Image (cartoon, rainbow, N blue to C red):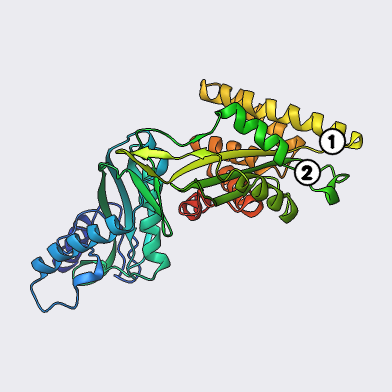
Amino acid sequence: MSKSMRITAVLGLLAICCMPFGASAQTAETDTTIYTALENGPRFPACEGLDTTLAFKKACAQRELLKFMYGNIRYPLEARQQNMEGQVVVSFVVEKDGSLSNAEVLKDIGGGAGVEVLRVVQGMNDNNIAWVPGQRDGQPVRSKFTLPIRFKLEEAKPYVLAGRDTIYTQYDTPLRFKGGAEALSTFLEEELKYPVDWSDSCKIGRIDIRLLVRPNGEVRVLDLTDYNDLGFDFWYEAVDATTSTAGQWEPAVYEGRKVGGAFDLQLPFVPESEACATVVERYQQANQLVNEGADLFDAGEKEAGLAKMDEAVALFPRNAEFLLIRGQAYLDMQEFEKACADLQLVRSIALVNYYDNVLPIICNK
C-alpha cells in the first residue's frame, strides 16, 4: 500500500471513530440518531422572536415552557383525593421539524398525574406548537428532552362555583334532608315513576343526579348521568322526582350562615311487568358480579376481579357503569387498548366526561 493510500485509510478510520455511538456514515438529512447531549439543544419556541443572545433565549424558553405546562395541567381528581404530591418526569424526542414524539413517563406519583403531563405534551403537537430542534454542526437533529413537573396541593377553597351559584365543599353542618336518609329514600320511592309508555319495554338501569340546594331551600339539577341510555322520558321522571324535594332540606351551614350545598342521588328504574322478571333477575346478578369483581380487584386479585366484571358486562354489554368500572381496572393495569375501548363506549352511552382530558393519551398508547 502506498503512503498516500495509508494516509487516506487512516483519515477514514478517524472519521468513523469520531461519530456518535450508534451512528453510521450518513448526511445530516439521513441522520436518525437521537442525541441526548447537545451544546445547542432543543427549545420551546416562545422566545425566538427576541433580539438577544442564545443564552437568554434558552433561559426564556425554559421559563415559558414551564408556564405553558403549569397553565394547562389539571391536577387529577384521584391524585387530589389521595393527597398525592411530588415530581413527575417525562421525556420526549424533539424531531428535526420541531414536532414531538416518543413521549414517556420516567417517574410518576400515580393518581393519573403522569398521564396528565403526557396529555399536555401531546397537546403541543395537536396545537401545532413546533419546537426549535436541537442542532449539531449547524444542522437540525433529533434530540431527547427531559421535563420534570412538580405536583403540589394548595389549600383548597371551601367552595366551588357552578355558574352563578356557589357550592360549598366544606361546612360546619352538612346539607341534610329533613327526617334523614330514610325519609329521603321513602320520599323518592313515592315520587319516582317508571314512565308509563315504557312499562313493557323492560328497560332497566340507573340515573344519577347531582342536586344543588340553595340557602333558601330551592333545588336545581347540576348534572344528570344516564348509565343505560334510558332516554328522555326517564330523565324527565328523574328530574321531576328530585326537584320535588324543594323545601324539604336543611341547608348546609358554614361559619354560622346558610350556604349552597350539593347532594348526589342514585335513582333506579326497574320495570314491574311480570314479562320483565328475567331481565330484573339478570340485572341484579350483574350488579352482584361487578361489586364482587371490584372487591377482588381492590384486594389484589386482579385477574379474578376482571373475570367477574367480564361476566357482568356480558350480561349487559351497554351498561356504562359496568364498563366504567372495568375500564378503570384496565387503566390501573396499564392495559391501555382495553381501557380505551371501555371508556370510549362509556363516553358514547352516558356522555360522562371524566376521562376526556386523558382519552387521547390512553387511546394513542
**Considering the numbered disc 1 on the image, is that residue within a helix, a strand or a loop?**
loop
Q: Amino acid at mark 2?
A: Tyr
Task: Say few, some or many: other residues with alpha carbon within 10 Å of mark 1 (under 14 / 14 to 19 / 20 or more).
Answer: few
Look at the numbered discs 2 and 1 and tell me whether their residues touch, using CB distance below 8 Å: yes
How far apart in space, not on screen, are marks 2 and 1 (Cα)? 9 Å
Q: Amino acid at mark 1?
A: Glu
Q: Report whether 105 appears left or right of 37.
A: right
Quadrant in the picture for residue 279? top right
- Picture residue at 85% right of the left edge, 51% below the top: 197
Give how far across and how far down residue 345 sits, in percent: 64, 50
Quadrant in the picture for residue 306? top right
Residue identified by numbered label 2: 194
In the figure, 82 relative to 27: above or below? above
Give how far across and how far down residue 287 sits, in percent: 69, 30
Depth order, front residue of 185/60: 185
Depth order, front residue of 180/311: 180
Q: Is residue 1 visible?
A: no
Q: Is residue 252 visible?
A: yes
Q: Report whether 337 appears left or right of 11.
A: right
Q: Report whether 354 appears left or right of 313.
A: left
Residue identified by numbered label 1: 272
**Considering the numbered disc 2 on the image, is that residue within a helix, a strand or a loop?**
loop
Q: Compare marks 2 and 1 and give the one earlier in the sequence.
A: 2
Depth order, front residue of 199/154: 199
Task: Say few, some or many: other residues with alpha carbon within 10 Å of mark 2 (under 14 / 14 to 19 / 20 or more).
Answer: some
Give how far across and how far down residue 44 sits, in percent: 25, 65
Depth order, front residue of 3/310: 310
Q: Number of labelled discs? A: 2
- Picture residue at 85% right of the left edge, 45% below the top: 199
Give how far across and how far down residue 272 sits, in percent: 84, 36
Q: Report whether 174 appears left or right of 285.
A: left
Residue 91: mark in rendering: none
